[in-house]
Structures are given as structure tokens and as C-alpha cells.
Amino acid sequence: MTPKQKSRMRLVLLVLAGLGITSLLALNAFRSNLMYFLTPAEMVAGDYPEQGMYRLGGMVVEGSINRLENGITVEFDLTDYEQTITVRYTGILPDLFREGQGIVAHGRIENQLFTAEEVLAKHDESYMAPEVAEAMKNVDMSKAIPASATKIPAGTTL
Amino acid sequence: MNVLLKFYHRLGSPREFYEISGSLIPWFGTISLILILTGSYLGLVVAPADYQQGESYRIIYVHVPSAWLSMLIYTVLAVSAMIGLIWRMKMAYVVMICSAAPGAWFTLVALITGSLWGKPMWGTWWQWDARLTSELLLLFLYIGIIALYNSFYERHLAEKSAAILAVVGVINLPIIHYSVEWWNTLHQGSTVIRSDGPSMDVRMLWPLLIMAVGFNFYYGLILMLRARNQVLIQEARNSWVAELVVNKGQAS
């Protein structure tokens, strides 16, 4: 390499390093704004905007889905395995909505209830055939299912 | 190593590149066609349905290869931009600018197929979560590079400006990949590229990898076809291009 090429290379690397550090600091500063949803634990801790709507993400608690008398309003408990919040929603639920499913609800707290205007389903990153999933259910759960499919790292990925 | 280095230097000459790529094109075309057909058959017909999403997960065989390629092409584009900036290599800039449009297309395909997949599974076409937003930013980067390149009359100025934008945009690549780990997102985490191995049935994984390799060869094919045109335009005043044109004219 000629000295000129060397200095150009140094400049390019310097720019890259500077940009890297800058974006790291910027992303870190806006960390909470970049979160797509809050977890029930964060909400119970009072770490949520009091005005306006926000998203709440968690797992639908088994056996907690309760359809009200009008037929289209549902109430269910949402948990991150630390705290649980009851969600009320009127409308059509996504196909993947069911007990034990990760979902994201968009709404606000009204009278101790999280009233959602939109409910979205999250699915995990595991793909398997139905018969495999069925077989795994019958075996020892804790060993058979890949750790990633069941573990919930404290409030990060649901 | 020496052989590779020699090959690299040969590719650096527009004329050599034109000759070498001419003989590679049929190979890339055949390989990508075979792989994509095989992958489609295995993925759409042979692979089992998903326990959770049923048949609709099969859009993964287009969505994921496109999304991977959108990032791989940007890596190629940015590395050639750096080589161009540092070593002032003609062919590096050619590879850079000829990668931009295919990259933008694959990004668009990833976004559209993701949207089509999101509606039935998540219940929404679009959400401003970190993964979706950073991938959209990638599309804008590609478009920006193309626009910047075309906004200069003088080619060297165009190459340099586009290359600088390309290098700056590299920051977005780790953000796209790690967005699903750093933040809460609607998009699920990585299935294939993860430390504890792919969390996917092998019968589903193989077609996906075959499709991904097929898509890569297709990109290679498109890149070579575009780069050959670019070389001819840039070298139009050189004698070897004139000879080529004359010979072609006589042959037909």
C-alpha cells in the first residue's frame, strides 16, 4: 500500500469507528423509546406513560380467557412470569391467539383493567412439524422443548 | 492464496472481468435455477406444516432468503465502496453501483412478503417495531445510493459520493440483525443464525438453505449482467470495446 492509500484507509476506519460509537450512544439514549412494548412487570413498577396509549406484551395465562356475555368482548390475563395484568379487548382476535401464546396489546389502563384497542399475536422463532410438537408435549416438557422456546429472559424477549 | 490474489487482480481489469464473467454467466444461471426449483419443491411440497402456523409459514422460503440477501448485498456494496475509496479501483465502484438496484429489490421483496405474512399471523400488515423499521431504512439507503450516484454528471464524483453514503450506511446492518435481541419487537428472534443452532425442523431447514444459496447465485448472475453493461458504457472509448462491437457485428 502506498502512504496515500494507507491514510485513506485510516480515514475510512476512523469514520466507521466514530459512526459506530455515535450510533451506539444514540441508540442507548433512546433505548426506552425503541422498545416496541412494555412488560407487565415494567407496568406494575409504574414505568409507563400515564397519558396516551402504549403496548403491553406477554403470555396469555392458561385458563384465563373469559368471553363476556356480549360475545365479542374478551378478558384474559397477560403475564411475563413476574407480574400479571388483566386485559380487556373487544374485536376480532388474530388466529394465533390462544392460551400460552405471546401477544402484544395496544391500549391504556382504565379502572385497573388494560383496555386494548388492538391485539397482535407474537410467535416464537421455532418451527416444527405438528406431530413433533405433539410428541414433545407428551415427553418431559423441560427437557424436550428447546430452551429458547420456553424460557423468558427477564422481560426482554417474549 | 497466490492464485486467488491473481484472480482478484485479473477481475480488477474491466476487460478481463468482461471475459471471465461471460463464461461464468451460464453456470450461475443454471445453478440458481436448479437450486431455486429444488428448494421450492422441497419447501412447498415436501416439508411438513408448522405446528403453530400451519401451511402459511411456507412464505419463509421467499421471505428469509430475500431478507438475508438484502443484508449480504449491502455488505458486498459497502466493502466494494471501501475498496473503491481506498484503492481507487474502477471495478470496485462498478460492483458497488451494480449491486444497489438488486439490493433494493430484495429488500422490497423481504418487506412485502413479511407484510403478507404478518397480516394472518400477527394480525397486522405493518408495525413500527425495530426490525421492520431498520429493514425499511435499508431500502431507503439503497434508493439513496442510487439517487446520489445518478445526481452527478461527473462519474468519479458520483462514485465517491455514493461510496461515502454506502460506508456510512453499514451501521444499519448490525442494527437490523440484533434489533430482535436488543429491543422488544413484534418480530420474533433469529431462527437459523443463533448460538445454540437453528431451532427449526431439519426437513424445513434444508429447503430454506437451498433457497438461500439459489438466491445468492441469482444475485451473482444479476450482478454480472449489470456490471458487464456498466463496463461497456464506461469503457466505450477503449479499443477492446470497439473490437468487441465490430466482431459481434460481423458474426451476426
Image: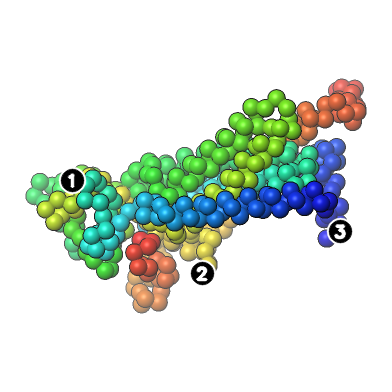
Chain letter for the residue marked with disc 1 in the picture: A
Look at the numbered disc 3 and give the secondary structure of its residue: helix
Look at the numbered disc 1 and give the secondary structure of its residue: strand
* Residue type indicated by callout 2: Asp
- Where's residue A150, x and y in %? 37, 68
Quick check: marks 1 and 2 in contact, CB under 8 Å?
Answer: no
Q: Which residue is mark 2?
A: B196
Q: How many marks?
A: 3
Q: Looking at the image, is mark 1 or mark 3 nearer the viewer?
A: 3
**At 56% across and 54% down in the image, what residue appears?**
A20
Q: Which residue is mark 1?
A: A90
Question: Is residue B240 shown to the viewer in this render?
Answer: yes
Q: State left or right for residue B230 relative to residue A120.
A: right
Q: Which residue is mark 3?
A: B2
Chain letter for the residue marked with disc 2 in the picture: B
**At 18% across and 58% down in the image, what residue appears?**
A86
* Residue type indicated by callout 1: Thr
